[in-house]
Image (spheres, rainbow, N blue to C red):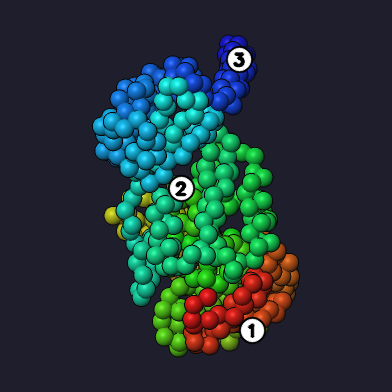
Amino acid sequence: MLKEMLRLITKQQRNTAPAEGKLEGEQNSLKEKGFSRHLQENLSLLKQLYSIPDNKDIKLRELYLGGFNKQAALLFISTITDVKSIEENILKPLTENTASDKKVKDIVAIQMVKEITLFKDAVKDINKGNALLILDGESKAYIMDCPDFQSRAIEKPDSEILIKGPKEAFNEKAVANISLLRKKIRNENLIVEAVEVSRRSHNDVFVLYIRGLANEKLIDNIKERLGSLEVNSIQNLSLLEEYIEERNYSLFPSILSTERPDRAASFLEDGYIVLLMDNSPDSLVLPATFWAFFHSPEDHYLRFFYGNFTRALRMTALFITIFTSAIYVAITTYHAEMIPPDLLLAIAASREKVPFPAAIEILIMELAFELIREAGLRVPSPIGPTIGIVGALILGQAAVEANIISPIVIIVVALGGLSSFAVSDLSLNFAVRLNRFLFILSAAMMGIYGMTAVFVGGLFYMVSIKSFGVPYLAPMSPNYKSSKDTIFRRLTKNETLRPGFLKSTDLQKKTTGE
């Protein structure tokens, strides 16, 4: 019975796949056609392409235009088009016009009107929320710019929260995000180019850069990578990132994601390239170095000493997160002579009834901490913090009382876990947390020597990473001419150079117009 069912399912799949391919082939052949001078022929083809009348949000309106003395038709998708604008700025002027010598472009009150001759251009623009006007007797059509995609309002950032600084964040509408950047960079050299990255869904990626600052070879490299993608659909930047990054299996991120317009604008002014896309409430910054992930926008919003103090805390937290648990395992397993006698006796007394080795203890608590963290993120927000606090307290207390975990392990794991929250960038945070387990395993096998070997190997690996041709640890290694904004920053007025590793056409920052 089961074999028969599988045979029928397989047969159905085989029959469906060619049918789908045949339908797509037929539609592609229809799109390649040009507009006819006969209105009804054009409407018949459009009805085939958009499955009218089955497709309920596709609106087709036929009308007579007295001024042109012609029959006409207007086609648009009501769910993504500004219907009010169509009524007031397109239909009303066209129907009220009495002058026969005027052109369509001169009559309608729309920002952009363009003429097209092929159906594939019409379909592409209609799917972007524009309206299509066809006149009888003309072998061309008119695209009217009137999209109205629904989106969130401009809100506060969720992941990059600052106490001091702007409170605006990107949303899922690329037009709104470009507007936020243009509000901060009021320069005619800020270029916005569009590259289509998917065949079926026709998703556009907007490439932003400042002409005269960004390296032209880098821009061409990025546009070439985007244009060479052969996929049916890429809905957002999070998916696009995996297609264009150089090392997909690397633990360390090589493309920076930010939801803050002010941060994206500062990168643009330094010669970086920013990618935006509809459906993505963030932007991608290319190329990216380790220091870009380590820094926070607030470092420059705070005064010099305050900003560097927070960076020192962040770097300390980074090392605590990576090494604390591993050092505990290494010392208690292989290097007990490094611990003062009184502390050694206290640790031995607390672990007297614990049946597991130190490495197993640490791994159990680290995994429990990660589970509690993940559960706190996924449950509804009103009870998320409660889950985290209550879960940690109950599990920790019960584990100690049951002699499964020693009290000092709770302290070590909690210190490392809490320190990881100081690493604000999500991608770097995951890299740090995963590397922590790598160091624990190396410490369990070879102690301090194993940790040292992994650390040195990790440094060699980071030096070998490149992000779109830029070394990962630049400008520290290799050394480039720049403002040396790495672990600590300089006074803002002394940061006079743009990053040399970007090979910008204008390395010197200027206080006057550029």
Residue type at the position of mark 3: Asn
Front of the two marks 2 and 1 = 2
Residue 269 lies left or right of residue 158; in this view the side is: right
Q: CA distance from mark 2 to mark 1?
A: 56 Å
| Comes first in the chain, label 2 or label 1 | 2
Residue named by callout 3: 15
Residue named by callout 1: 338
Front of the two marks 1 and 3 = 3
Is there CB contact under 8 Å for labels 1 and 3? no
Q: Position of residue 22 (x, y in %)?
A: 60, 19
Q: Tell me which residue sits at (64%, 44%) in the image.
A: 229
Q: Position of residue 152 (x, y in %)?
A: 33, 50
| Comes first in the chain, label 1 or label 3 | 3
Q: Tell me which residue sits at (41%, 85%) in the image.
A: 303
Q: The N terminus is located in which quarter?
A: top right
Front of the two marks 2 and 3 = 2
Q: Is residue 476 above or below residue 368?
A: below
> Does residue 208 appear in the picture of this structure?
yes
Residue named by callout 2: 278
